[in-house]
Amino acid sequence: MKDQIAQIQKQALQEIEKVEDQKELAEIKVKYTGKKGELTKALRGMGELKPEERPAIGKLVNELRDKLEEEFAKKEKELQEKELQKRLETENIDVTEPSKKTTLGSIHPITQTIKEVEEIFLGMGYQIADGPEVEKTFYNFDQLNAPEDHPSRDIQDTFYITDEIILRSQTSPVQARVMETQKPPIKIICPGTVYRSDTIDATHSPVFHQVEGLVIDKNIAMTDLKGTLEMFAKKCLGENTKIRFRPHHFPFTEPSAEADVSCFVCGGKGCKVCKGEGWIELLGCGMVHPNVLRNCGIDPKQYSGFAFGFGVERIAMAKFGIEDMRLLFENDIRFLKQF
Ligand SMILES: [Zn+2]
């Protein structure tokens, strides 16, 4: 019996020695010290011994159990350390390894165009002004010399929230707000979203973007307006761009004009983009109406100014050769990916 116990010990220690991982160790634990393990079997075998021999053998078995448990604990700790070490070695991060490819979005052509226009005017010393999209009719119309009976106030054309609150139909109310709170000289552009109850088609949308500009100072003349727009057109659409003015009417400017630019695709010869005209309609502009200045607390005898405004979509469509405005807001990823 003693030999048998010694044999179990020898074998168990050898097996513990060879163990490679924790799973294997757990199996050996069961094999020797489990309910049906070798040591339990040995204890059962004690029935065949003479009574006086039993205590000594029992003691041996218990001692062996203690010893083995100590060995198991020791081995377990050793294995844990080994596994940690292995993980540290194999899981270290290779900073030179190429990363997984992530797909970045692109900047929307409208945003790109607004940013570019902003850069051009910032370069000419303008500031960027912002204002509410949900606006009072007072700022959208009254302050801008568009009285109650003006056609642009028609319920057909403008989104009314109440009789006095609308979704702004232009970014001009920002100009009115700036004139009300700042003293001249004023030199601002107002980019932003505007709303009109237009039906969606290839060139119209009920939501679109405008950039408007306003300069108020002493001795500002029509030539300043023309020079500014020429500079802008060249920077935005190309050095060879020419500009021409056609008389027009707006309630907030007098005189008013529409400005065309020479077609930057054909250079004025006539093509598909300019519909054979050689010119592309770009914007509306004019000298700020004295009534507008007065409404906003600026003395028209001392100060004069010019204003202009254009649709961002029109410029983006021209610049990027987009033929249908709907592409700009349908969010088709195949379209957007190109920019
Ligand atoms: Zn052309």
Image (tube, rainbow, N blue to C red):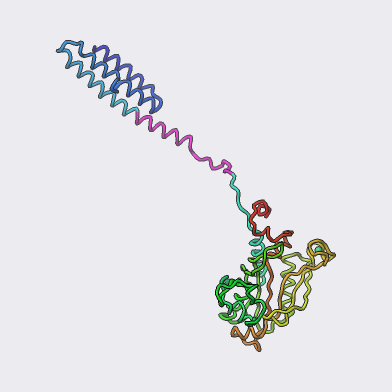
Q: State the residue at coordinates (81%, 64%).
A: 275
Q: Main secondary structure of the magenta part?
A: helix
Comparing 306 with 62, the one in front is: 306
Vertical position of residue 15 compared to residue 247: above or below: above
Determine the residue located farthest toward the left in the rendered image: 52
Q: State the residue at coordinates (29%, 23%).
A: 34
Residue 264: % across, % down: 78, 64
Which of the 4 quarters of the picture holds residue 251?
Answer: bottom right
If the image is split into quadrants, where does the C terminus sit?
Answer: bottom right
Is residue 61 something one can see in this rendering?
A: yes
Residue 62: % across, % down: 22, 21
Q: State the residue at coordinates (74%, 65%).
A: 237
Residue 164: % across, % down: 56, 77
If the image is split into quadrants, where does the N terminus sit?
Answer: top left
Which of the 4 quarters of the picture holds residue 178?
Answer: bottom right
The range drawn in magenta is 76-100
Residue 78 counted in the magenta span: yes
Image side of residue 198 versus residue 240, left or right: left
Vertical position of residue 205 compared to residue 94: above or below: below
Is residue 170 something one can see in this rendering?
A: no
Q: State the residue at coordinates (35%, 26%).
A: 26
